[in-house]
Image (cartoon, rainbow, N blue to C red):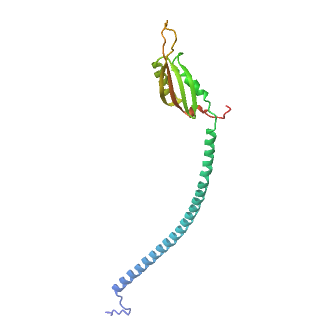
Amino acid sequence: MIPDINLLPERDRKADAFGRVFYLLIGIWVILLIVFGYQFFQTKSDRETLQKEIDSLTLDKRILETKGNEQPTDDANRFQEAVEYVDNLPLPTSKIITELLHLLPNEHSYLTHYSYTGGNVSIETAFETLDSVATYVSKLTNSDMFQNVKVDHISTTSIETDQTETYFDVLPRYNVLITIEVYLSSLRPAGGDIDE
């Protein structure tokens, strides 16, 4: 028999397993270090990009705020000028008189007094019956040109004669004092220039 001589030192299998685990942990640690390093530099780059974008947007915001602060004053001035121009336009009040005469209920009703003051009209009318008064007030209320129709006073007038004998019946006339607010927009032209 040949003797079995092994001149190589015997390897400890436990130490070999420990070495493999050690190298595996070092490899995992190096991989994690690379991943975290990449994430760090990528995040730093993204942060710098976002900071530049935030600075740019902040600058744009300041520019828009300064423009916004300047623009409303210009718009407000233009608006104020437009309001003053429209307020100074002459309004054709003849439309009011035409409408008031058109709405009178019958041929025995008359417009005896007319006064226009800044959107308010005061009129005095003469009617034969109270039904005619009610009809006229109703028509005024339903008109698109008028609002806030108020009957201020109703009085009767009778004709007194020196004659003792009358051959006909004298009907009293009802004098009615009415105050009306006018929709000023109904007096303004629908659009275009004044000359149109």
Residue displayed at 42% across by 76% down: 28
Residue displayed at 61% across by 51% down: 73
Nearest the camera: 56 or 81? 81
Is residue 32 shown above or below 164? below
Residue 131 lies, in percent from the top left, at 45, 19
Is residue 188 shown above or below 166? below
Quadrant housing residue 122? top right
Residue displayed at 58% across by 31% down: 116
Residue 84 lies, in percent from the top left, at 62, 42
Residue 160 lies, in percent from the top left, at 51, 14
Residue 127 lies, in percent from the top left, at 50, 19
Quadrant in the picture for the C terminus: top right
Is residue 11 shown above or below 29? below
Nearest the camera: 125 or 80? 125
Nearest the camera: 60 or 50? 60
Residue displayed at 52% across by 71% down: 44
